[in-house]
Image (tube, rainbow, N blue to C red):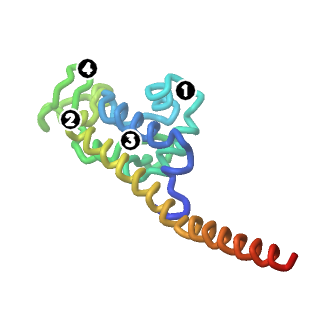
Amino acid sequence: MSRAKSPYLSDPNRLADVIAAIQVMSTYKFYKLPFDGWADRISADTSRGEYWQKIFEQHPEFFRLDGQRQKASLVWRRQYPKRFQVDEERVLTREEFAALDERTKQRVSRVRLTPADIKTLVDTAINLHARALEERKEKRWWIPLASAIGGLVGGVLGSLLSLLR
């Protein structure tokens, strides 16, 4: 994350949006959807697909795009095998998965994250946001100093001008 261009500081709603995306993407039955699908799930507005795509692209610490860059998923969920049968809401054995036909395999995803996993991700987002805010403050260390010096110079000049009158 660049100090000058932290995506967490690009929009006042960014942290809330990242947290919302984490919550939805970690618990929805399918782990990967097109951007307009996530827009519908997160903000109930399929027309906001490009907005969510930008968020997914700017936060690779949480999100990844597929090879065609048409769908997004949560990185943590991608680490689990694709054996969660969404209709039965259960994890299939390797043998059960291998026995499925191609049409049925389309109803198989990756397991949902646990509440503890979600808390870890949300805490991470909050910490990254706080760090970005702190770095922005550190870059402005000179402003109070410049104001104080400006005030001092103004006071000295005022005193000198009053002596010259």
Q: Mark 4 or mark 2, which is nearer the start of the sequence?
A: 4
* Residue type indicated by callout 4: Asp
| Labels 2 and 3 touching (C-beta < 8 A) | no
Residue 56 picture location, percent across and down: 47, 45
In-image side of 121 versus 140 (left or right)? left
Task: Point out the frontmost of discs 2 and 4.
Answer: 2
User: Residue 108 location, x and y as percent?
Assistant: 27, 30
| Residue 55 picture location, percent across and down | 50, 44
Instruction: Return the disc, 3 or 1, that comes first in the chain's sequence.
Output: 1
Give the mark count: 4
Residue 23 % position (x, y): 34, 33
Mark 3 and 4 residues: CB-CB less than 8 Å, in contact? no
Q: Earlier in the sequence, mark 1 or mark 4?
A: 1
**Residue bearing the label numbered 2:** 114
Residue 73 - label: 3
The residue type indicated by label 1 comes to: Thr
Looking at the image, is mark 3 or mark 4 earlier in the sequence? 3
- The one of 121 and 91 positioned closer to us in this rendering: 121
Which circle's residue, 2 or 1, is located before the other in the chain?
Answer: 1
Name which residue type carries label 3: Ser
Query: Please, what secondary structure does the residue beneath circle 3 have?
Result: strand
The image quadrant of residue 146 is bottom right
* Marking on residue 87: 4
- Per the rendering, the mark at residue 46 is 1
Please name the residue shown 50% across and 36% down the image.
35
Give the position of the N terminus as an image quadrant.
Answer: bottom left
